[in-house]
Amino acid sequence: MKNFLETLRNIWKIEELKNRILLTLGLVAIYRLGSQVALPGIDSASLTALQDQSSGGLLGLLNLFTGGAFARASIMALGIMPYISASIVIQLLGMAVPYIQKLQREGESGRRKVNNITRMLTIVIAGAQAPGYIANLVSQLPNGAESLTMGYGMFWTLAMMVLITGTIFAMWLGERITDKGIGNGISLLIMVGIIASLPASFIQEIESKFAIGAGGGGPLVLLVEMALLLIVIMLSILLVQGTRRIPVQFAKRVVGNRQYGGVRQYIPLKVNAAGVMPIIFAQAIMFVPITLAGFSGGDQNSAFMRAFSDLYGFWYNLTFGLLIVIFTYFYTALTVNSNQIADDLKRNGGFIPGVKPGKKTAEFIDNIMSKITLPGSLFLAIVAILPAFAVTGGVNAQFAQFYGGTSLLIMVGVVLDTLQQIESHLLNRHYDGLMKSGRIKGRSTTGATAI
């Protein structure tokens, strides 16, 4: 405890770090305040009926990421998700479109152009999602359009403008946190939205365990659940931080009286290079058959519909896990370009000991990635379906979301990334890091600068 207080004092002594943290907290508070403001034109008495409109399925996932703003008909109902969708589209286009590839290689100027394209695409995606949200919102009101305090046409126009503006404002807040604050702003806003539902879910879990005559299990069962949650978090940290380091040797160069190169660096290949993207892709694919069947008027009581409507059932989670493994390989192949790594090494005078530069190096890296991706994909699939096991074990459905899946991995990754930046500020000013032994790796590793 003494070391922790000393670390907090050291953080407060660094003026730049203190200002960054305070700015980040202020911008996050503004984002959370905006998520509590309802869209204009809705009768206040009708807002209470909206809380259960996004209780499950894909809408429940969106509601979790927006911190409940989706179900509250907030001006931030779409949140930062259109920006995330636009970033994913641009990242995928960067693998196939030469123009995007060229911009990504142009350094800072190219990055600014890519960011501008992402922003424009965010507005387009938000404009496409807003009508669907408004239609769903009106259908969930107790009296439909009669619950509105203005005409439907006026409400539709005003809500469209407000929702798109809310997404743009959330995007601006995230970028300001990244530039002037601490941590990745976009990821922080998502994490804050997820954590916002944690206290209420935890209280519900406590009430269910201490309910008289309900067979909740009492404090002993609650302690066991907390211990298991701690173990799951530790395993998730191992999954996020796990890397396979490939040694790289650089040739010596003598320029004047100085010697360059001749040192050994490492290429850190992550066990889970795809992050949470395979879970997001698989989650979206799993809801496609149900959505199509709903639009086509299919039999809701068929065995197929029952199996894939039960988010905690066997067949749903088996299919979900297999899709995660497949998408992990797919997304890793897109994000880790072994040929480019090999070319960069060769151009900078680096080589892997015992491996010929060029094509042989690319094949060696690709082979290593194939080997480490298999256990990484299986581990990721297990973490993704852990909420189903938690619900089967008697955990409340809302609280079970924190036992694994996208929510837990996002929180672990963002926390590690933010702590890594804080530790860098401390070490750069000759203070001790956050831990006496070891260093926080987060999402990036210093060895990556070798490429």
Image (tube, helix red, strand yellow):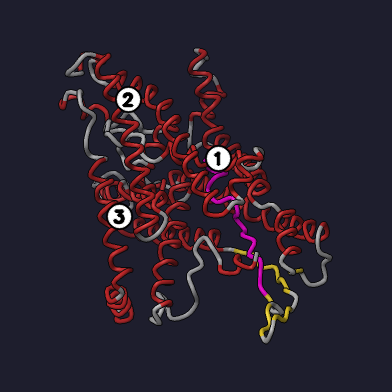
Q: Going from the N terminus, do you reach mark 1 or mark 3 first? A: 1
The quarter of the rendered structure image containing the N terminus is: bottom left
Which quadrant holds residue 102?
A: top right
Disc marking residue 160:
2
Side of 324 relative to 148 (left or right): right
Q: Under tag 3, what secondary structure?
A: helix
Q: Distance between the residues labelled 1 and 3?
A: 50 Å
Q: Is 9 contained in the magenta span? A: no
Q: Name the residue under label 1.
A: 90
**Residue 105 at x, y percent in the picture:** 61, 51
- Label 2, residues with CA under 10 Å away: few <14, some 14-19, many ≥20: many
- Label 3, residues with CA under 10 Å away: few <14, some 14-19, many ≥20: some
Q: Is 271 contained in the magenta span? A: yes
Side of 250 relative to 73 (left or right): right
Q: Going from the N terminus, do you reach mark 3 or mark 2 first? A: 2
Q: Distance between the residues labelled 3 and 2?
A: 48 Å
Side of 20 relative to 336 (left or right): left
Q: Going from the N terminus, do you reach mark 1 or mark 2 first? A: 1
Taking 36 as reference, is 358 above or below it?
Answer: below
Badge 2 amino acid: Met
Q: Name the residue under label 3.
A: 218
| Magenta-drawn segment | 265-282
**Residue 220 at x, y percent in the picture:** 34, 60
**Residue 293 at x, y percent in the picture:** 52, 18
Side of 21 relative to 346 (left or right): left
Q: Under tag 1, what secondary structure?
A: helix
Which residue is located at x 75 percent, y 75 percent? 251
Q: How far apart are marks 1 and 2 (CA)?
A: 24 Å
Front in this rendered view, residue 179 or 80: 179
